[in-house]
């Protein structure tokens, strides 16, 4: 009997970063993929053609990146800088600075602003259309209870997750104070927060193999729907081994979501029906970041050791782009008892 072929993790992109991958994101307009890394680079790939289209070197590790439009993007620097990257001309400029490394960057199409979160315990909003000069581009600085770890946007809503398990929810049209100040319902440090595409709430993951499903509406009926679940764990010799959940990505069509953990697995979940839909075969090392393409047909996976066990030999950093089958991401209809 012939052995079954090994499962395919997706197509591996050539010219990957040479150090840890901090984030990757698909464009809203094409299959372009933007990737930031601890190797001080931001790389732009055409994920369908498997071509490296551009590379920008920074003065320190790059902790996050996002698109502005298909021809430009932004990056969050470990050297405290916020940069704008113009792909076609291969040029960059400094939009502004924080007082500590910039951990997160998100562009709001609704507000036409860039939002950055830093370990200096502030959030800053920038108008990238402003002429050169920091004072013209900085819209506002908003103190946070702790270092910013993760940001997510949906419409005019902004969710900010910080150290100390704080979660602040803002309306971008009035940033003077949070609309809601919350605490994570998970006991351990927050790793990632991502808003539901339908705008009703957010998913939040922790270092302790759990994801919480939360709702913005504070009515009793809505709050009764919130729950948390365990994931990215395994039992070995009667012991539970628990892994951080580094990444959450929502499918743009079905609203189901993928999680990636330090166990090297990517799982797909149906949050409404509280079911796991799919588990992809194991990747070579920790899953550092995930992103679905704009039509949900591709999933980019960063297989990149996140140093959760300190310095040790590990698999090379790699980006896999896999085709997504409907069966993996489409909610299964509920079977009603006959």
Image (cartoon, rainbow, N blue to C red):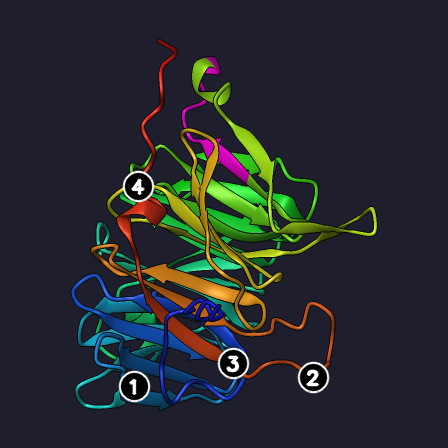
Q: Nearer the viewer, mark 3 or mark 4?
A: 4
Of discs 2 and 4, which sits in the foreground? 4
Alpha carbon distance from label 1 to label 3: 25 Å
Query: Residue at coordinates 50% horizontally, 72% vertically from top-left?
Result: 303
Task: Say which element carries label 1.
Answer: strand
Q: Does the magenta segment cover residue 285?
A: no
Q: Earlier in the sequence, mark 2 or mark 4?
A: 2
Q: Is residue 80 left or right of residue 49?
A: right
- Reading the image, the residue beneath label 2 is 313
Question: CB under 8 Å between callouts 1 and 2?
Answer: no
* Residue lying farthest to the front in this orientation: 1
Q: Which residue is mark 1?
A: 92
Residue denoted by label 3: 317
Q: Mark 3 or mark 4: which comes first in sequence?
A: 3
Q: Secondary structure at mark 4?
A: loop
Camera-side residue of 154 and 156: 154
Pointer 1: residues within 10 angstroms few (<14), some, or many (20+)?
Answer: some
The image's mark for residue 330 is 4
Percent coordinates x, y for residue 293 in the rendering: 26, 61
**Tag 2: Cα neighbours inside 10 Å, few (<14), some, or many (≥20)?**
few
Asked whether disc 3 touches disc 4, contact meaning CB atoms under 8 Å apart, the reply is no
Residue at image x 55%, y 38%?
212
Q: Earlier in the sequence, mark 1 or mark 2?
A: 1
Snapshot quadrant of residue 195: top left
Left or right of 336, for residue 183 = right
Whole-angstrom CA distance, mark 3 to mark 4, is 30 Å
Task: Please give the label number shown on residue 120.
Answer: none
């Amino acid at each position: 009997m012939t052995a079954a072929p090994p499962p395919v993790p997706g197509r591996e992109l050539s010219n990957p970063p040479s150090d840890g991958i901090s984030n990757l994101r698909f464009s809203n307009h094409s299959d372009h993929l933007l990737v930031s890394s601890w190797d001080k680079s931001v790389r732009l790939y055409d994920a369908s053609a498997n071509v490296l289209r551009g590379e920008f070197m920074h003065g320190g590790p790059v902790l996050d990146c996002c698109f502005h439009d298909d021809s430009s993007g932004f990056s969050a620097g470990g050297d405290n800088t916020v940069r704008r990257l113009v792909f076609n001309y291969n040029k960059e400029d400094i939009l502004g600075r924080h007082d500590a490394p910039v951990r997160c960057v998100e562009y709001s199409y609704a507000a036409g602003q860039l939002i950055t979160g830093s370990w200096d315990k502030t959030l800053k909003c920038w108008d990238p259309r402003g002429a050169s000069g920091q004072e013209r581009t900085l819209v506002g600085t908003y103190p946070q209870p702790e270092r910013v770890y993760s940001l997510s946007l949906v419409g005019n809503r902004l969710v900010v997750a910080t150290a100390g398990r704080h979660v602040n929810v803002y309306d971008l049209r009035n940033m003077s104070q949070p609309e809601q100040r919350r605490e994570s319902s998970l006991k351990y440090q927050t790793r990632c927060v991502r808003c539901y595409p339908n705008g009703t709430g957010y998913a939040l993951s922790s270092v302790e193999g759990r994801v919480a499903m939360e709702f913005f509406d504070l009515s009793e009926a809505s709050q009764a729907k919130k729950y948390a679940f365990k994931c990215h764990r395994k039992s070995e010799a009667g012991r539970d081994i628990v892994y951080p959940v580094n990444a959450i990505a929502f499918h743009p069509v079905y609203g189901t979501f993928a999680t990636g953990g330090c166990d090297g697995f990517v799982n797909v979940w149906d949050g409404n029906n509280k079911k796991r839909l799919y588990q992809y075969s194991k990747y070579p090392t920790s899953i550092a970041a995930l992103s679905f393409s704009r039509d949900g047909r591709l999933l980019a996976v960063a297989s990149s050791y996140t140093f959760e066990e300190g310095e040790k030999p590990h698999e090379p950093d790699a980006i896999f782009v896999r085709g997504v089958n409907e069966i993996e991401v489409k909610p299964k209809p509920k079977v009603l008892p006959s």
